[in-house]
Image: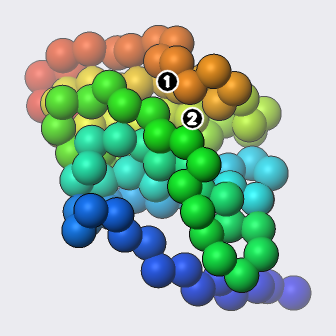
Amino acid sequence: MSQTFHYQLHWADKDIYSVCFHQDQDYLVAGGQSRSVEILNVKGSTSQIVTSFKGHEAAILQVGSNPFGNLVYSSSRDGNINFWDMRSGLCVKQLQDLQSAV
């Protein structure tokens, strides 16, 4: 049985380029023109931003989470890939200067 989810995602009139469900399915990870990774609680009929991870200098092109749910990653036009700790919100690793948008 499949489920269909309908959410309207926007903040500050910035485009969203990538979304994925977090491992536990209660959270959606989103990134885009705002240059921040947004974690949204999508449990229930509405969605709300519960935290933001900031650290990129350009638009975020891709987001994802690891199978254990403790890390979120983001790649950006700034040429960096950041790995974020879900609990602390800190960038725990950064792959830098990858020569082009990743």
What residue is drawn where x is 35% and y is 41%?
Answer: 36
Q: Quadrant of residue 94?
A: top left
Is residue 63 visible in the rendered image? The answer is no
Residue 65 location, quadrant: top right
Residue 3 in view: yes
Q: Which mark is residue 61?
A: none
| Residue sitting at x 55%, y 80% | 7
Residue 62 in the figure: left or right of residue 100: right
* Quarter of the C terminus within the rendering: top left
Label 2: how many residues lie within 10 Å, few (<14), some (14-19) or many (20+)?
Answer: many
User: Observer-nearest residue: 91 or 47?
Assistant: 47
Cα distance, mark 2 to mark 1?
6 Å
Q: Position of residue 12 (x, y in %)?
A: 27, 62
Q: Which residue is mark 1?
A: 83
Q: Amino acid at mark 1?
A: Phe
Categorize mark 1 by other alpha carbons within 10 Å: few (<14), some (14-19), many (20+): many
In this view, the residue farthest toward the left is 99
Q: Nearer the viewer, residue 12 or 29?
A: 12
Q: Say which label, 2 or 1, has the lower sequence index.
A: 2
Q: Is residue 100 left or right of residue 19?
A: left
Q: Residue at x 67, y 59 (%)?
A: 41
Which quarter of the rendered picture does the N terminus lie within? bottom right
**Residue that carries the numbered disc 2 in the rendered image:** 72
Q: Please provide percent x and percent y for residue 83.
A: 49, 24
Is the Cβ of the residue at disc 2 closer than 8 Å to that at disc 1? Answer: yes
Q: Secondary structure at mark 2?
A: strand
Three-letter code, disc 2:
Val
Q: Is residue 85 above or below residue 22?
A: above
* Residue at 71% across, 81% down: 45
Residue 56, x across and y down, in percent: 27, 30
